Image (cartoon, grey):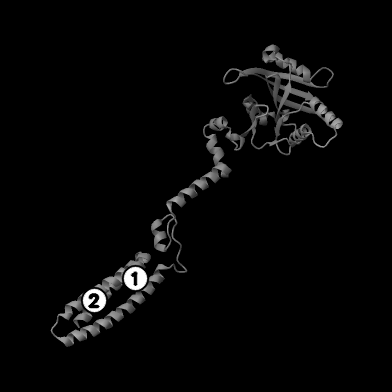
Amino acid sequence: SYIRDICEVVTNVCRRWTLCVAKSHPVLCVIKSTASLKHTMHTQLRGIGGNLRGCSCHKWHSTTSVEKARRHQSLHVALAIDNESVTKAASPSEGSSLPSPTDPVEVIAWGGRLPSRRRLLISSISATAIVLGGNLGGVTSRLLSSDGGALAARLRLDVLVPVAGFKRCVDYTNMFEFSYPADWLGDQTLANRAALRAEAQRGGIDPPALRSARQQQGRNVVEPVAAFGPPGSSGEENVSVVVAPIFEGFTLQSMGSPEKAGAWFLTTIAAEGSGRQAQLLGATQRLSADGTQLYYEMEYVLQGPGFNRHNISVYTARNNLLYTFNAQCPEVTWPRDSAQLQHAAASFKLM
């Protein structure tokens, strides 16, 4: 009777402890019930049996041993039942919801584990690189536009990523750069002609006589080396750069003031008898940041049979080459497009 009461008390206490822990920490309960709990209860039973061995009554000792064995077997059965119930409690039921991934306690209690710090760090760096490199959601453009695009312009990051609505064209062959609206596209006709010129210079498969004639024809035509315009347009709205040779020793200062140079220029594109009319609206000059390169900028309107365009042109000269940047659009769209065309003209410079 004494041993029975003690075993019942120990069994009840341990079972309540196991079920209590199972409700709050199922995973911890499984570990404790299979290892430390079993060890603790076995130790208690061995202690009780050891104290009873000192009893003078052998029959009582034998009865205690038999009773101990029965209680020990009952304890194993109880533990097996408890372990099964705890395992069911530890596994999520069909109607239970998944734990919140932002709560480590719920994740571990549910049965998962947190990723290692190294994996978490690598994943974070990779995700950040993909977002910034791919400009997902325009996040890179917004970050680079936060300082007005100064950093992007200095590092020429706006060649790849639009900044403040503009991208940058950089020509390392002719050493110039300028900005253009980010949604505009490059002129594919110029790209195809450049490919043909490169093929002609390599020789190709043409006979020598035909090759020489084509090269001579290409030298007689002066066309833009870079041009951009809105997709699907007629080509009347665009920005372009023409690089042409000029006589040795030419400088803009030799043409006089910007107004005088602009008036002379308009006489060349709207000569008498050409059917064109040109009106100079303004002319200014600017220097490069280091003060070594002079630019003339002029704004004018050019009318002719079937067209009426508003233009902004920028001129500069270096190494016996005349660089001409031109931004134009129909006069009817000038109020809408004037800001971006003026920005493109102001951004043109030699490198």
Secondary structure under tag 1 reads helix
Quarter location, residue 286: top right
Identified at 35% across, 74% down, the residue is 82
Q: How far, Cα to Cα, is label 2 from label 1? A: 17 Å
User: Is residue 197 shown above or below 91?
Assistant: above
Quarter location, residue 48: bottom left
Query: Do the residues under discs 2 and 1 have CB atoms within 8 angstroms?
Result: no
Q: Mark 2 vs mark 1: which is more N-terminal?
A: 1
Residue with the mark numbered 2: 45
Q: Quadrant of the C terminus?
A: top right
Kind of residue at badge 2: Leu
Identified at 63% across, 24% down, the residue is 349
Identified at 58% across, 35% down, the residue is 157
Secondary structure under tag 2 reads helix
Rendering coords of residue 54 (x, y %): 15, 80
Looking at the image, residue 157 sits to the left or right of residue 195; the answer is left
